[in-house]
Amino acid sequence: SHVMSEFVRMTDTERDQIDQDAQVFMRTCADAIHQLRTEAHKGVQSAQVKEHRTAVLDFIEDYLKRVCKLYSEQRAIRVKRVIDKKRL
């Protein structure tokens, strides 16, 4: 109960700003992964190094996709709550 008494609700403006920042951040990460993938395939290197870099980038890209999916699900819940409140 002590923790709850210190809890401050965020405003819709703050939530919108977080959403906007999160989208920009996710886009930036996707672009960075794409750039790293392009750079990883440049230059002379062994097949093993290429395979390792590709696997690492695939893992990072998959992780980003899971984070984006989780974010989208949470955003959908927020939108649903806003719609439900407007109906009332």
Image (tube, helix red, strand yellow):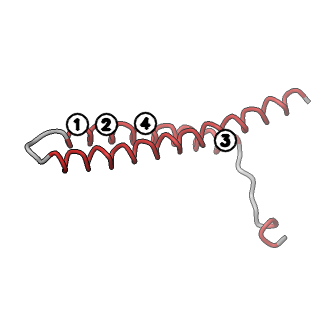
Q: Amino acid at mark 1?
A: Thr
Q: Amino acid at mark 3?
A: Gln
In front: 26, or 52?
52
The mark that comes first in sequence, 3 or 2, is 2
Give the residue number, with chain letter if any, for mark 1: 38
SS at mark 1? helix
Q: Position of residue 55 (x, y in %)?
A: 32, 46
Give the residue number, with chain letter if any, for mark 4: 27
The mark that comes first in sequence, 1 or 3, is 1
Q: CA distance from mark 1 to mark 4?
A: 17 Å
SS at mark 3? helix
User: Residue at point 28% right, 43% down?
Assistant: 54
Q: CA distance from mark 1 to mark 3?
A: 32 Å
Give the residue number, with chain letter if any, for mark 2: 34
Mark toward the viewer: 1 or 4: 1
SS at mark 2? helix
In front: 55, or 2?
55
The furthest residue to the top:
87
Q: CA distance from mark 3 to mark 4?
A: 18 Å
Q: Amino acid at mark 2?
A: His
- Residue 74 disc label: 3
Q: CA distance from mark 1 to mark 2?
A: 6 Å
User: Residue at point 53% right, 40% down?
Assistant: 68
